[in-house]
Every structure is written in structure tokens, then in C-alpha cells.
Amino acid sequence: MERADLIDLIYEGAADERAMQNAIRELLGLTRSRGAQFGTLHRSGRWVRSIVVDYDTSDMVTYLEHFMPEDPRLIVVARNPGRILTGDDVILDPVAFEQSALVNEFLDPKNARFGMALTLPINDSYSLDLSLMRSRSDGDYRSVDVETMEFFLPSLKRSLDLRIKLGIFESKARALSDVVDAVDSATFLVTSTGSLVRGNARGQAMLSDGTFVFVRNGRLEPRNLRFVPDFSAMIERSAQRRPEDAVSEADTTLTLEGPGGKKAVATVLSLHSSVGRLPGAEVALFLKELAPAHPQVAGLGVAFGLTGAETRLAQGLLAGKNLETLASQWTLSRETLRTQLSSLYRKTGTHSQSELITALQSFLSFTVL
């Protein structure tokens, strides 16, 4: 199977469990693996999706119940999110590992001695967990195998991100229209030109309210006409984007403004043709109204030891703006803001913008009580 076709299959797997199993099986062939365990883990520790390919599911249950607590590799993988790890990367004491019950009583008998694993945060609630396995006779994974997996990681992450945003984890609905109707947030399915194909109940309520968006000549548009060009361009870019294309936050989000200073963030995701299953739907658009700025925002600097510039950046992010927008607004380089953002991560003990905003919002909620 060509790489482009495999990417197609991965995107189809966003809504089709069997398609994702077939995609993982193709990855096994490309990396000469015997089997795989692939799933999505909630931060509570609950598996919301787990796929075992070419291994007996009962063997995985045995591992989880009897061997996982003593598996030294898991700690290393957990401490290196986003990095594909193999052999020497995850085994700190090779001699002890070779003598362990895990190797001699489980991994070797099950042809799973060598592994290639990673955990990849998808958002602040879910992470992708993937483990490919080989037998001892197959030999350990090499750099070429890691490079192969790295090529497909962005597609795997976006496929799962789409699955999460559409709420498919907790739903057995197969038609995209049924899934969208069950989503809590305001969700719209549109064409590349913005023509509205479907909106769920929350989305219809937003249209009736008319604060941020409305339908004109069949097209979904911002109420504030100042945002129409950027809004339309964002949807068109998303519809034209190929699965393997790199995507930045500026490409997929736009903060809309309504009357009285109200703001909402629009986020778009491409609907691959294999995933959509709804004629004409090319892009999913999610709209979330932002809470008004809290009067205690200024206290962030004191609480976390932030500089004035870092506090201003924190306020901008809380307002729903991205680095590109803030850099333009403040006439600063993106590199300067990235440096400030790295400092914010360090001072707040976070590792991503979603984690940072959650931490800041938690602080603001606490100061109200």
C-alpha cells in the first residue's frame, strides 16, 4: 500500500474501528512487526479505545494484570511524551531486564521481546499510546523503523483528535451526521466555500442567537463582517489540506468578536472524504464562546512569579488569541513570544498551551472562592 493510501486509511479510522485496525496492520508490515497495541488513554487512566492487532487479546489482559506493574519500560515512555522509543532507549538495566519474569515468562514466549513505543498527548485529556512488537529472532527496531513511524504520527494524532472532537469515543454511531448531533459543543459541517451542510442543536442555538455567526445565502459567516475574509480563508485552507500537510494553530483557529466585547474561538478540522460519510461536508467547525476576562488576571504575575511581558502573554492566551495574532498585535517576533511561552511553561509546571491555559484558569477559579 502506498503511503498516501495508508494515510487515507488512518483518517477513515477516525470513525471506523475496522479501518483503524487495518491501518495499524499496514504499519506492522512496514516496520516488520509481529503485532501491536494501539489506544487512547484518558488522563484518569481509563482506556477509551484500545486495539490489539495480530496478538491474542487475552495475552494483553495477562500482561496488564500480571506484568505491567513491574515493566520498567513504561516509566521511560511516560517521561518522554511525543518521542518514539526503542530497545536501548527504554531499558535502563539490560542485564536485569533479560533476567526478569517479564522477558522470560511473557515477552519471549509471546514473540514480543522487542518493542517500539510512544505516548503522544492529543489534548489536555487524552493521549495516544502505541506499542509495536517483534520477536527476539526478528531483532530490535532500527532508526529506519522509527523514521517510518514518525512520518505517520501527525496523521494518527489528527485522526484521533477528530474522533475526540466529534465524541465518537462514547458513541456507537457510524454516520457522521448522527455523531455531530450528539456533540455537546456548537458544531457545524460545511463545504469548502462555507455552505452549511449540518449543524447540531448547540450550533443551531448559536445561529438563532446570532451573536457570532449566521447563515447568509446558505453560507455560514461571522456576524462581525470584519472577520469574514479570515473566516472564509480558514475554511477553504482546511478543505484543501492534504492529510500529510503540516498544520499550525494559526491555520485552524480564529477568535471572533461579538457585541459587548464577547468573544468565541472557531476551530476547524478537515473531514477526509472517507471519514465524512455526509455528501458535501468537507470541514467540521467547532465554536466555543470564551468566558469574559476575570478581574483577578493581574494576580497571575504575583502567583507564578511572572514578568510583565509573561503576564501579558498569559492574558492574551486566556483571551483565546494565538501567538501569531499576538505577535502581530504587539509588533513582536514569534521567536520572542515562544521564549516567553517557554518561560511560562517552566514557571507554571506545564508542557503545552492547553495545559498552561487549564492551570491559569484553575488559578483564576480558585481566587474567586
Image (cartoon, grey):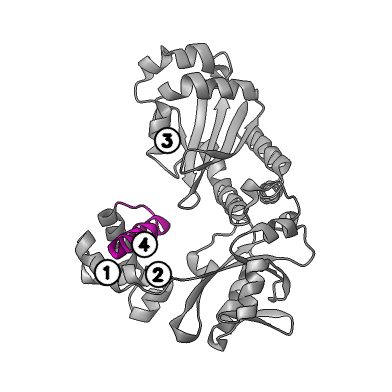
Q: Which numbered marker is on residue 288?
A: none
Q: Amino acid at mark 2?
A: Leu
Q: Amino acid at mark 4?
A: Gln
Q: Is 198 situated left or right of 69 in this image?
A: right
Judge depth for marks 3 and 4 and give the one in front: 4
Q: In the image, which residues are magenta?
A: 349-369
Kindly identify which residue carries mark 2: 323
Q: Earlier in the sequence, mark 3 or mark 4?
A: 3
Q: Is 311 situated left or right of 38 in this image?
A: left
Judge depth for marks 1 and 2 and give the one in front: 1
Q: Which quadrant of the figure has residue 197?
A: bottom right
Judge depth for marks 1 and 3 and give the one in front: 1
Q: Is residue 183 magenta?
A: no
Q: Residue at x 28, y 55 (%)?
A: 348
Q: Earlier in the sequence, mark 4 or mark 2?
A: 2
Judge depth for marks 1 and 4 and give the one in front: 4
Q: Is 246 situated left or right of 17 in this image?
A: left
Q: Earlier in the sequence, mark 1 or mark 4?
A: 1
Q: Residue furthest right?
A: 279
**Gap between marks 3 and 4 measured at Cα:** 29 Å
**Gap between marks 4 and 2 measured at Cα:** 18 Å
- Label 4 crowd (10 A; few <14 / some 14-19 / many >=20): some
Kindly identify which residue carries mark 4: 361
Kindly identify which residue carries mark 3: 77
Q: Which quadrant of the figure has residue 272?
A: bottom right
